[in-house]
Amino acid sequence: MKKLTGIGAAEYARRRKQLMQMAGEQAILILPAAPERIRSHDTHYPYRQDSDFWYLSGFPEPEAVLVLVPGRKHGEAILFCRER
């Protein structure tokens, strides 16, 4: 993942791991990105990511979902995003 804030991928992984430890192995955490906002039916607000989503993923784009599955052997963190 490209650094946008000077925070590396290892730090985001550490944050996700800490949250998953608190949630426990029987939990599934689903975190949606902030939606894009429109005012007056035709003017887009500048996009701002949800603070919790940003803290855990560092992913700046809308229409994304971060799924955390504690205890899963492979792929504890899965990021769904728009196709490019």
Image: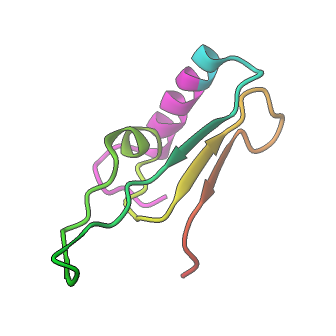
Where is residue 22? Give x, y as percent. Answer: 58, 15
Q: In the picture shown, does residue 54 fall above or below 26?
A: below
Residue 8 painted magenta: yes
Q: Residue furthest front?
A: 40
Where is residue 24? Give x, y as percent. Answer: 69, 17
Q: Is residue 70 left or right of residue 12?
A: right
Residue 59 painted magenta: no
Residue at 28 percent across and 50 percent down: it is 5
Instruction: Read off the magenta span.
Output: 1-19
Residue at 71 percent across and 26 percent down: it is 27
Q: Is residue 40 left or right of residue 59?
A: left
The quadrant where residue 38 appears: bottom left
Q: In the picture shown, does residue 32 fall above or below 36?
A: above
Q: In the picture shown, does residue 48 fall above or below 30?
A: below
Q: Residue furthest right?
A: 73
The quadrant where residue 49 appears: bottom left
Q: Work out which quarter of the rendered image holds the C terminus and state it.
A: bottom right
Where is residue 19? Give x, y as percent. Answer: 54, 24
